[in-house]
Image: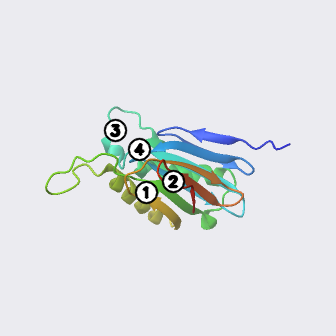
Amino acid sequence: MSTAQAVKIGIAEMEVVVAPNVIRTCGLGSCVGVVIYDAGKAVAGMAHVMLPHSSMARGGVINAAKYADTAVEALAQLVMAAGGRKGMLKAKMAGGAQMFSFSTAGGDVMGIGARNVEEVKKQLERLHIPVVAEDVGGRNGRTIEFNPQTGVLSIRTATQEIKEI
């Protein structure tokens, strides 16, 4: 009998799991699901990033998981605290769709999805964590699940078959 659990995270949340547990988030539209993992230690963390910059925060207390500029580093620290090794960390990401069209003659006005993807990549590069696979952009929402034992990120959308990266 397996004691593995699927740990679910919601919008603007982050969590870390160790194999055999897996980690999942639903409802990625313009949000980005970023996974940082150490395959050798079978440990992984996932953040459901909602907005690109913490400068968009209203109020005094910032939820680090909500913003790309704060979530990536906080997630990397959580993964290392759970046994991940700094030089062995890799990342996978999905989401960043443009779910709604507010376009004008010039195109996308808001572009939150693209800005989320750009900021997550910027922060990963700053921390020297390579992005080894991604499924970003488009117009479809995604549900993702990462298995730290296999290093596979499964991506489910309403209109496509399950994709594994």
Please report contact status of discs 4 and 3: CB closer than 8 Å, yes or no: no
Going by the numbered disc 2, the residue's amino acid type is Val
- Please state which of residues 130 and 23 is positioned toward the viewer in this rendering: 23
* Label 3, label 1: how far apart the Cα atoms are: 17 Å
* Label 4, label 3: how far apart the Cα atoms are: 11 Å
Q: In which quadrant will I find the C terminus?
A: bottom right
- Please state which of residues 165 and 158 is positioned toward the viewer in this rendering: 158
Residue 63 pos. (x, y %)? 45, 38
| Residue shown at 41% from the left, 34% from the top | 61
Residue 100 pos. (x, y %)? 30, 45
| Residue shown at 47% from the left, 40% from the top | 12
- Please state which of residues 161 and 29 is positioned toward the viewer in this rendering: 161
Going by the numbered disc 1, the residue's amino acid type is Val
**Which residue is labeled 2 in the image?**
34
Please report contact status of discs 2 and 3: CB closer than 8 Å, yes or no: no
* Sooner in the amino-acid sequence: mark 4 or mark 2: 2
Residue 142 pos. (x, y %)? 48, 48
**Which residue is labeled 3 in the image?**
57
* Label 2, label 1: how far apart the Cα atoms are: 8 Å
